[in-house]
Image (cartoon, helix red, strand yellow):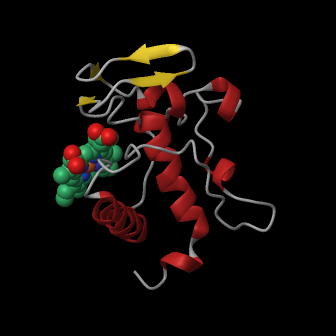
């Protein structure tokens, strides 16, 4: 894990997988404890609220080409990780995913170990898409 900060492209690749693969397209159901006004809409106390994380992670206005797998969108000109507030695969706020740091650590260890120990080749000469 101490190598992680020296491997920003690996980190950016994992971030792009989390953005593009979108394994939790919606967050868990939540509610409001009081009436809330937001952008001209009234959300009454007790209403069911389901955040569509997908609508942010795949937003063309934010990402430009959300359908493309492009890890370098998370890197600046010097190769350092750029934090974007729209990167919300673990949701946001007080009830965001409790397992985020563990999940990100495991993804790093699994990916890096597989890259070190295996050779990845396309199926029957097919080009990777
Ligand atoms: C890539 C892996 C993971 C993704 C993308 C993910 C994503 C999410 C999302 C979107 C939520 C809903 C948050 C909300 O309702 O606003 C959530 C909740 C939660 N996740 Fe994860 N999760 C991952 C892995 C894990 C792991 C490994 C654990 C535990 C070891 C975990 C524990 C939890 C818990 C306990 C909640 C409920 C939090 C609460 O309601 O306060 N998650 N996760």
Number of dots carrying numbers: 0
Q: Residue furthest bottom?
A: 2
Across and down, in percent, residue 106 comes to 30, 65
Residue for point 38% across, 61% down? 111
Residue for point 56% across, 14% down? 40
In the displayed structure, does residue 129 sit left or right of residue 48?
A: right
Q: Quadrant of residue 129?
A: top right
Residue 54 in sight from this viewpoint: yes
In the displayed structure, does residue 83 sit left or right of residue 49?
A: right
Instruction: Out of 56 and 9, give the one closest to the viewer.
Output: 56
Residue 129 in sight from this viewpoint: no
Q: Residue furthest right?
A: 77
Instruction: Out of 51 and 21, give the one closest to the viewer.
Output: 51
Q: Is residue 1 above or below residue 13?
A: below
Across and down, in percent, residue 49 comes to 31, 24
Q: Is residue 39 above or below residue 99?
A: above
Instruction: Out of 116 and 51, give the one closest to the viewer.
Output: 51
Across and down, in percent, residue 27 comes to 31, 34
Quadrant where the N terminus sits is bottom left
Residue for point 32% across, 35% down? 24
Residue for point 26% across, 19% down? 47
Q: Residue furthest front?
A: 34
In the displayed structure, does residue 31 sit left or right of residue 105?
A: left
Q: Is residue 25 above or below residue 110?
A: above
Across and down, in percent, residue 6 comes to 58, 79
């Amino acid at each position: 894990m101490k190598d992680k900060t020296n491997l920003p492209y690996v980190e950016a690749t994992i971030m792009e997988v989390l953005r593009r693969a979108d394994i939790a397209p919606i967050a868990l159901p939540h509610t409001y404890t009081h009436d809330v006004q937001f952008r001209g809409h009234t959300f009454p106390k007790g209403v069911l609220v389901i955040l569509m994380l997908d609508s942010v992670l795949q937003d063309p206005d934010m990402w430009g080409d959300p359908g493309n797998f492009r890890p370098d969108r998370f890197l600046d000109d010097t190769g350092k990780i750029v934090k974007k507030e729209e990167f919300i695969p673990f949701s946001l706020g007080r009830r965001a995913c409790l397992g985020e740091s563990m999940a990100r650590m495991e993804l790093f260890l699994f990916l890096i170990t597989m890259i070190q120990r295996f050779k990845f080749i396309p199926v029957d000469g097919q080009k990777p898409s």
